[in-house]
Amino acid sequence: MRADSLPPELVDGLDIGEVTPLSGGDIAEAYRLATTDGPLFLKTLRRPTPDLFEREAAGLRALREHAPETLGVPEVIRQSPTGLVLEWIEESPRRSGATEAELGRSLAHLHRATRDTFGGLQDDPGGYLGSVAVDLTPHDSWPEFYLTRRLEPLVTRAIEEGRISPRARDLLEAVAPRVSDLCGPAEPPTLVHGDLWGGNRLVDTAGRNWLIDPACHYAHREIDIAMMHLFGGFGPEVYAAYDEVHPLADGWRERIAWYQLPPLLVHAILFGGGYGASALDALARYA
């Protein structure tokens, strides 16, 4: 593939020798750029939704600012409305118990980054989960934020697009009066990755963990823990080490499905399939 077929604002002046398409992305196209200064990673979308890559870049910068030295986050080299150029991470397929434990400790330290309100970075009212726009207007109450900024809009959209049964609205109305109890003990607004499934964690050839593709905002930290359980990919050492550094509140395991509702609803909206049924089952469990 030729470099001149990529967005010029992302590649001009990089002295690219070879462009290699990469697989694995559900939304954007991804490429490895071989340059005279070493390899880079480029992701692009020809018709992106507004501010999609701007917000991803802001999330990467926030993670780099607050992550401990043991947790890598790619540097943003270039950004534009159509994509990002990032530091290249040379991956290793190996996952040792020590690597998993280090991820748990590192994530626990990252989750020490807090502020006064739940919502977007620097009070940014907009954001994305995947490519689905979400409202990140700041709020003092986590249960109210979770109900009104997450569950209600996503359930409404999933119903309107025929991705979930209209029964989901009735189930949500049934759980709404109990949302404070279902959200668990109060915790401070914590910087979360926001989309921490196994594919958004890399391990490099030196055994260092890296986080990519964030949907960063300030939320209850169990949002990340629940997402990590949704599709697997993390060893038990992660959670044991996390708990040693920053123990989770009692009952967190019972809240995993509760906090998996937003990604299930987003997946239902984007991909259909059985995700809507899984979200409906989770709502029914708590109703």
Image (cartoon, rainbow, N blue to C red):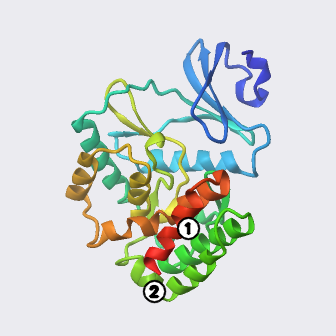
Residue 263 versus residue 57 in the image, above or below: below
Return the residue at label 2. 178
Please give left or right for residue 169 compared with residue 186 in the image: right
- Considering only order in the chain, which callout, 2 or 1, is on the residue closer to the N terminus? 1
Which residue is located at x 50 percent, y 56 percent? 194
User: Which amino acid type is shown beneath numbered disc 1?
Assistant: Gly
Camera-nearest residue between 148 and 157: 157
Quarter residue 3 falls in: top right
User: Which amino acid type is shown beneath numbered disc 2?
Assistant: Arg
Residue 122 versus residue 273 in the image, above or below: below
* Mark 2 burial class by Cα count in 10 Å: few <14, some 14-19, many 20+: few
Residue 231 versus residue 78 in the image, above or below: below
| Residue 85 position within the rendered picture, expressed as x and y whole percent measured from the top left | 63, 31
Camera-nearest residue between 181 and 14: 181
Gap between marks 1 and 2 measured at Cα:
21 Å
In which quadrant will I find the N terminus? top right
Which residue is located at x 50 percent, y 50 percent? 62
